[in-house]
Image (cartoon, rainbow, N blue to C red):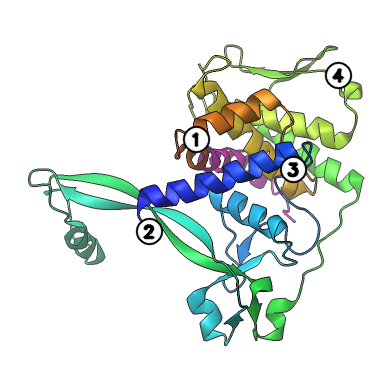
Amino acid sequence: MNTQKIYDKITSTIIEMLEQHKKEGFKKSWYNVSGDAIFAHNKHTNHFYRGINQLLLQYLRDKYEYSHNGWLTFNQLSELGGKIKKGSKAAIVVYKSHLYIDANTGENITRYIMQLKKNEQSIEHIDYQKRGYMKGYNVFNISQIDNLPDEYYKIEELEKLTEFERNEKAEFIIKCTGANIEYKAGNSAYFQPSKDLIKLPLRKQFKSDANFYSVVFHELGHWTGHKKRLNRNMSGKFGSKEYAFEELIAELNNAYINAFLGYENTITNNVAYIDSWLSIMKNDTKFVVSAASQAQTASDYIFEFAEARQLEFV
């Protein structure tokens, strides 16, 4: 499958998810935090998928009501003696790779460059261009596979933190960022890049702790984009593609961190945002892939502050 077909397939799946969210009355969650592992992972290597792969696999898990959140490649399940159930469809997992192109002749010299690197030889004398592209491979959910060893069907009991423990961990993460947060009675929550300041309503105005942390981590998502940090384009005006892109990054960052904490975070019910994302995705198939990648970078950035202070992750 070529790069464009991969982008098309990913985007059509996310469009389906958002349109279904609207049809169901805005009840769909980004991540299901009940049963088995919260995050999609390779059951054989225990590698947790990142970026757009999490969104794709989480949606497919919910759509087909898989009880597991572990996945295997065809080669892995075959080596384990597994058999794919009749009628099962593979999910796609993607990653970025790149080609090396001779800047003078346009020839693909990737193999030559990789051989030099393998032999620890210099490539500084070569005039080349580096071109990125998307690659993908198929995976199957454990629920789609028969005859695997018994341990592969074991559903791990999720650690059930008390509300106090979840809140304590959330507060620790927020505090470790050192973000400047100002609370004031009102109905607005936003990040002000010119002052590097997050403004929030009073905490007592929020309906629940989960609702409060959802807003905080959304705004912290924007906070990571400041020029002093990840330096994203924060100049987009409401209604622009740039604005929609930044909002999607913040929304996905928020969803990821809340899932990590054990809060099930519903996809936004802001129709203007969703319709904007859908409109852009139908014309730009790279939009959601890029946003998910940058959201993963944003949440990694936030977690790094807590890790530096020895946060014990669940």
**In this rendering, the label closer to the viewer, 2 or 4:** 2
- The residue at the far left in this view is 105
Q: Which mark is residue 258?
A: 3
Secondary structure beneath dot 4 equals loop
Q: Are marks 4 and 3 in contact (CB under 8 Å)?
A: no
Q: Position of residue 61 (x, y in %)?
A: 68, 59
Q: Which residue is mark 2?
A: 1
Q: Amino acid at mark 1?
A: Lys
Crowding at mark 1 (Cα within 10 Å: few <14, some 14-19, many 20+): few
State yes or no: residue 293 in magenta.
Answer: yes
**Dots 3, 1 in contact, CB < 8 A:** no
The dominant secondary structure in magenta is helix
Query: Tag 4 or tag 1, which sits nearer the N-term?
Result: 4
Q: Earlier in the sequence, mark 2 or mark 3?
A: 2
Specify the segment rendered in magenta: 291-314
Give SS at disc 1. Answer: loop
In front of the other: label 2 or label 3? Answer: 2
